[in-house]
């Protein structure tokens, strides 16, 4: 999988790509990240990439000409062709006006051969860039950043770790928050429980490791008893409890069994 980043701050990504999962993925040749300096496609003496907005207003807007030249230099299929073969390449504008980035979108991107990320700056990007070249706009959250570089780093990390072979244990990406793995506490097979928190995008359950007691807090007894069905049930309920507390909005679309609903209602859920 290849990522192409278009940015006015190419050095921003040096540290991010030099550590952890991304570093290993790059070293193994499973992921390729190429950073392109937008100013290299501006041909005036000052390498200008922004200008004042039509209609007045605050700030500056990234100009269409350098961005168009940068995108066209990558040798991508035209936008119309990409729409008919979405797995070949996608051009994405990172913007506060974009659709919210989710784990589901990360999985979609992990199946694409090539992803181009345009890092917006200033007040935004000339709208014609999106109309002519971009397959989608994405935002990583309901807040405004100084630029799209941080968002690009998030998208790369979230998608790259889902590429086959990047994680040492493939189940690591299947059984985690916002996953779509299990449908409830009775869905696991015999043997040690892997995870039951992925159903329909609910949050992860609490995790514990040694020591068994830390500063007066003990590991829940159920986790040390070896009753796999009880552990699955406990993990499922704690995941539901945490989702209700931290992200109740996720429950509306979650795959919930009737036992799940009864448990949540006992906690005060109105769904």
Image (cartoon, helix red, strand yellow):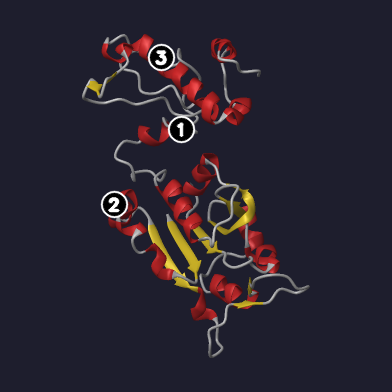
Give whichever of discs 2 and 1 has the lower sequence position: 2
Residue 81 location (% of width, % of height): 63, 60
**Residue lying furthest bottom:** 45
Q: Viewed as shown, does residue 165 lie left or right of 49?
A: left
Instruction: Classify mark 1: residues with Cα within 10 Å, few (<14), some (14-19) or many (20+).
Output: some
Q: Nearer the viewer, residue 251 or 84?
A: 251
Under tag 3, what secondary structure? helix
**Residue lying furthest left:** 211
Residue 124 location (% of width, % of height): 63, 65
Q: Nearer the viewer, residue 137 or 187?
A: 137
Residue 24: image tag: 2
Under tag 2, what secondary structure? helix
Question: In the displayed structure, would residue 51 be above or below residue 23?
Answer: below
Q: Residue at x 61, y 30 (%)?
A: 249
Give whichever of discs 1 and 3 has the lower sequence position: 1
Residue 53 occupies which quadrant of the picture? bottom right
């Amino acid at each position: 999988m290849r990522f192409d980043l278009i940015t006015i701050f190419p050095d921003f990504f040096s540290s991010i790509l030099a550590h952890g999962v991304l570093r290993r993925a790059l070293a193994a040749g499973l992921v390729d990240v190429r950073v392109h300096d937008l100013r290299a496609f501006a041909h005036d003496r000052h390498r200008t990439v922004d200008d004042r907005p039509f209609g007045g207003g605050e700030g500056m807007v990234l100009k269409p000409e350098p961005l168009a030249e940068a995108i066209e230099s990558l040798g991508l299929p035209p936008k119309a062709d990409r729409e008919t073969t979405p797995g070949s390449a996608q051009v994405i504008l990172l913007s506060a006006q974009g659709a919210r980035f989710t784990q589901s979108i990360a999985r979609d991107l992990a199946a694409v051969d090539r992803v181009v990320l345009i890092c917006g700056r200033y007040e935004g990007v000339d709208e014609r860039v999106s109309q002519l070249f971009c397959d989608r706009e994405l935002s990583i959250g309901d807040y405004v950043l100084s630029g799209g570089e941080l968002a690009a780093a998030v998208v790369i990390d979230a998608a790259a770790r889902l590429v086959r072979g990047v994680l040492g244990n493939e189940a690591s990406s299947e059984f985690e928050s916002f996953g779509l793995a299990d449908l409830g506490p009775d869905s696991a097979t015999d043997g040690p429980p892997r995870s039951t928190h992925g159903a329909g995008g609910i949050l992860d359950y609490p995790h514990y490791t040694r020591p068994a007691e830390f500063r007066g807090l003990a590991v829940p007894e159920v986790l040390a008893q070896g009753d796999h069905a009880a552990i699955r049930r406990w993990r499922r309920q704690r995941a539901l409890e945490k989702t209700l507390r931290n992200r109740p909005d996720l429950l509306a679309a979650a795959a919930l069994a009737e036992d799940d609903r009864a448990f949540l209602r006992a906690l005060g859920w109105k769904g």
